[in-house]
Amino acid sequence: MGRPGRGGAGPHNEARGRPFAYANLAVRGRLIDDVVVEQLGPGLALRPDLVSICAGGNDLMQSRTSVDHVLERVEDMVAHIRAAGADVLLVTAPDLAWVPIVNRMHHRFVEFTARCWAVAQR
């Protein structure tokens, strides 16, 4: 849990008498199912106002995981977070077409990004 008044929005909110805190539950390398099981519940227990989701990229790098599965999990997380009263910030995949090893999977990232936009619109 971040401490109020430490960079970012902290000083802005503190000067206005509004508390500010943050929690970073991210763990590098996790797959989407791990994020849902290990991070969603503890994150919601903090009663956040805003939750950012940057997940699914590791799954997309594995051809055995379907884009459908990743998006179903993302959409489920968004639904749970919104039902808890928090806003959601979805982070989409960057354009990595120029990276030789990722170029083969570029179409998966493009589809993921487009479908994340659709989730965000709902």
Image (cartoon, rainbow, N blue to C red):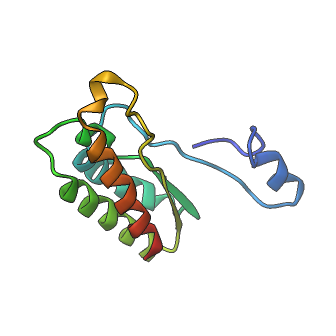
Total marks in image: 0
Q: Is residue 34 left or right of residue 110?
A: left
Q: Position of residue 55 (x, y in %)?
A: 36, 46
Q: Position of residue 100 (x, y in %)?
A: 31, 22
Residue placed at 74% from the left, 43% from the top? 8
Query: Which quarter of the rendered picture does the C terminus lie within?
Result: bottom left
Q: Between 120 and 38, which is closer to the camera in this rendering?
A: 120
In this rendering, the answer to whether 65 lies above or below 28 is below
Q: Position of residue 84 (x, y in %)?
A: 45, 73
Residue placed at 75% from the left, 49% from the top? 9
Q: Is residue 24 left or right of residue 67?
A: right
Residue placed at 35% from the left, 49% from the top? 110
Residue placed at 33% from the left, 66% from the top? 75
Query: Which quarter of the rendered picture does the N terminus lie within?
Result: top right
Q: Is residue 89 left or right of residue 66?
A: right
- What is the residue that sits farthest to the top in this orientation? 100
In this rendering, the answer to whether 100 lies above or below 27 is above
- What is the residue that sits farthest to the left in this orientation? 64
Q: Between 40 and 4, which is closer to the camera in this rendering?
A: 40
Q: Is residue 7 left or right of residue 29?
A: right
In this rendering, the answer to whether 28 lies above or below 90 is above
